[in-house]
Structures are given as C-alpha cells and as structure tokens.
Image (cartoon, rainbow, N blue to C red):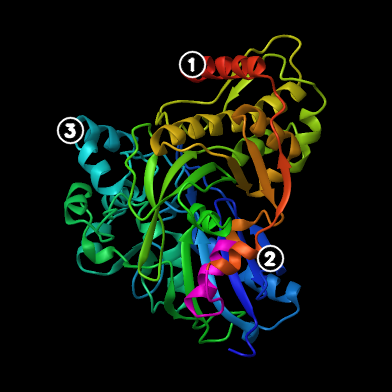
Amino acid sequence: MATRRYVLAVDQGTTSSRASVLDSKLNVVGVGQKEFTQHFPKAGWVEHDLNEIWTTTEWCISKALKDAGIKGSDIACIGITNQRETTGVWNRETGKPIHKAIVWQDRRTSLFCAELKAHGDEPRVKELTGLVLDPYFSGTKLKWILDEVEGARAKADAGELCFGTIDTWLVFKMTGGASHVTDVSNASRTLMMGLKSLEWEDELLKLLEVPKSVLPRIAGSSEPYGMTRGMKSLPDGIPVSGMAGDQQAALFGQACFEPGESKCTYGTGAFLLMNVGEEPVASRAGLLTTVGWKLNGKTTYALEGSSFIAGAAVQWLRDGLGLIKKSSDVEALAKTVKSTGAVVFVPALAGLGAPHWRPDARGLFAGIDRSTTKGHLARAVLEGIALQIQDLADAMRLDSGRAIPAFKVDGGAVKNDLLMQYQADILATNVVRPRNVETTSLGAAFLGGLGVGFWKSPDDIRKAWKADKVFKPKMSEGDRATHLGKWREAVKRA
C-alpha cells in the first residue's frame, strides 16, 4: 500500500464515462472522459450498449492514468459510481449481454406499471421499497427483458443469467467475472429490495416475476467486492472497494453527513437529496425514500426528488434543434435577452418525475409569440430546469419538516452562473457551489478509499470540502410569485 498512493474513481454516467485519479488529499490529478452512443429504438425507449460502456470505461481509465503521469500499479483501490436504474442482463459464463441495457429514462414499461397500480399494488410496493410504481426503476425493465428476449426466462430460471445495474456490470468486468455484487444504494432503486431489510424481497420478486437466481449479492457501500483481473490498464489484484449510485455518491462527496444536509446534482437529470439519518422517512409529497449508503454496518437514508431532464434539455437544444454548437454555449445565448419574454419551458421530454409522477407528460414551450427568439428559448430552458428543482425543494421541506438553509450543488451544469443565480432566486435560498463540482467522483473515491483504509474517517472529506461561490437570492418576492404562477400553469398543460 505504501507505493500505491492514489485512488481511482470511475463515474459511469448516462451520456459519458469518466475516470479520475485522486491523491490522498482529494486532489484530482488525472481525468479521462468519453461520450458513448445513445440508442432510441422507439419513441420513449432509451438503450445503451453494455460492451460500449465497458470499452469507454477502460479507455477513460487509461487516459486518466496517462493524464496523472502514473502507472496502474500506483492505484490503491477503485471506487465506482454509476447511473442507477439502468438495467442489464448478461450470460454468467461468457459475460455476453443478451440485450442492450434499458436506461433509467426508458418508458416502455409504463403500461405494466399502470396495471400494477390499477390492481392496487402500489401502496405495498411503496411501503417496502420507498419507491413508486414507475418505469424509472429497474424491476419492471428486468421483467421486460426476461419476457421479451427469446429464451431469457428459461436461462434465468436455470441460473445462467446475471442481472445488474451498471455498478454490477462494471465490477463483474473488472474482476474478470468473479464478482456479481451490488451495493445497498443501487439495490434500493430496483423495486426489489426492502428498505429496512436491505435484502431482496420475495414478495416483490413474485410480483415482478423475477427469479432470485439472476440477482447480485447486496453489499455495503465501502468494502472490498473483489480484485481486478484481466484489465487493460490495471494490474491484477487491485481491490474494488467502494460503490454507490451517482446521486448517493454526490451526497457523500458533498459531505452531507448530518440529517437535514442536502445537495442537488445537475447532470442529464437533476436530483435533490437530503440526509434523513438512520431511519427511513416515508414521503407524503411524492418524493422517494432511498438508501444513502451503508458504512461500517450503519445505514444512512435519504429523501430524493428527481427530475428526469436537466442537462439533457441543453443537449436537445444542441442536437435536436441545432440552436447551439456545444452545451456550454447555452449561457451566452440565454444572456442575449434580459428575460424569457413570458416563455416558459417544461422539461418533460421523458415524462415528469417527482413530485408529479406523470410518465405521460411531454415537453412544452408556452408563451411563444412573434417576438420570441432563440435566446428566449435558451433562457426558458435554463429557468425550466431550476423551476423543477423548486417543486422538489417544496416537497422536501414538507416531508422532512426541515428548512433547507443552503443548497449545495454539483454536476457539470453548475458552472453556468446564470442557471445558479436563477436557482437561488426561485428557491429564495443561498446556492453553494463547491470548488470541486465533480462531487459524484469524489464520493466514489472516498467510499473506495475508506473500504481499504486509505482514509480513516468521513471527517477527512469534510475537512477537504471547500466552497467556490455562493449565489444569494436577488429576486423580489412579487417577481418570484409571478414566475412560479406561470410555471405551475404550464406544468398542468404539459
């Protein structure tokens, strides 16, 4: 361990894979990032190629090591964080996927979810899992693969197949197929794990028609899961020792260790999480109850509100409408106008998540007239992202009975000052941007390092966390009420 002075964090996201090398003081010394293909076979369907995810991950690791100027043998351990509910199934012996992964944004199981709701199953599902019956989660996606891929169910029953969210896939590949494992934070997003038992629930598996033989072992978020074997850029024998879903990893990386501490991550979607302590809090306002992490035998729970589309709306302006050449251009375009000119954008491009839970909702521009320019559209998209978060924050205050004194933010979109200032204005709360906005990777690295004793205590990350900028609300209460009124009317029409 003396010569292994660095931790490798792998952050496998919805549109790109990323690897970061961190030193013992949590400085990022090397980075590799690469986008991969998004597949849209039908309206409302979104898929990823698991093999492409793996090849881009390996490329990113190689690039990060080269960027840091170190060898693979200098790595002490690996921490993984990942897009969460995305569902893969592969052959246990060959490691070959039997179908493309079904992405968390995918809505193909909407009808099945509606049938379960109509049958009256949702209250019990929510009681056990903290989740709602929505196509967002992994369980119904897994059922679809087992039902629709020829021969899949028979092979699953025979023990020949492995199911996994992306963390499970990456550990399986990193360990040469030796480890089939997930952590409690990812398992809590499947509709199959009990929030309190932290185990696969037979009652839920029966409801979803999922054989237990395909499921990974559920482990804690910071412990050795296996050793590297047969990787291109890393020697055999490096422990994979940290794992958490991307939003939980960001909560950890933002040092939100006390009940009431909250963060919001702006990635492809936007996700607001609040640490609620060692007992789960049931939501009455349309939020989800989820596992934050399990560390040293102690489980921390969180409330979560998710907006399916955030940065993806900016990508749509770039790729779908061609209004900008690169995502970072959106701020300059939005600044060409002083306001949206009464244009409101509802980012329901993949339905509406919490607290609305309307998978049938669709994106909407309202208030367009002949004076509307592409600047107005760009500004409305940024404001729509922030207004979704306001809805989540209101629900979180209601459920938790706590004020949110300050909002810690992270993710690529928080570099956009216009968006962050509007977020502070519409929340009427200080928005705090950290010096290191890639806190998802930071959380993964820290969980990995804690799992092998590279770091001793979460106090080390609290000491390392530093603010970059605080955005203070400037909007008058009257203007804020006007913005919220127009937004709520538009949401009804989406």
Q: How crowded is mark 2: few (under 14 residues within 10 Å), some or many (20 or more)?
A: many
Q: How far apart are marks 1 and 3 (CA)?
A: 28 Å
Label 2 element class: strand
The residue labelled by disc 1 is 493
Q: Is residue 341 magenta?
A: no
140 or 261: nearer the eye?
Answer: 261
Left/right of residue 287 with respect to residue 273 in the rendered view: left
Q: Residues within 10 Å of mark 1 (few under 14, many from 20)?
A: few
Label 3 element class: loop
455 or 11: nearer the eye?
Answer: 455
Left/right of residue 417 with respect to residue 44 in the rendered view: right
Q: Magenta residues, as a range? A: 442-457
Q: Is residue 451 magenta?
A: yes
The residue labelled by disc 2 is 32
Q: Earlier in the sequence, mark 2 or mark 1?
A: 2
The residue labelled by disc 3 is 119
Q: Do the residues labelled 2 and 1 touch (CB within 8 Å)?
A: no
Q: Residue at x 39, y 36 (%)?
A: 399
Name the dominant secondary structure of the magenta segment: helix
Left/right of residue 370 with respect to residue 305 in the rendered view: right
Please give the count of numbered marks on the rendered protein: 3
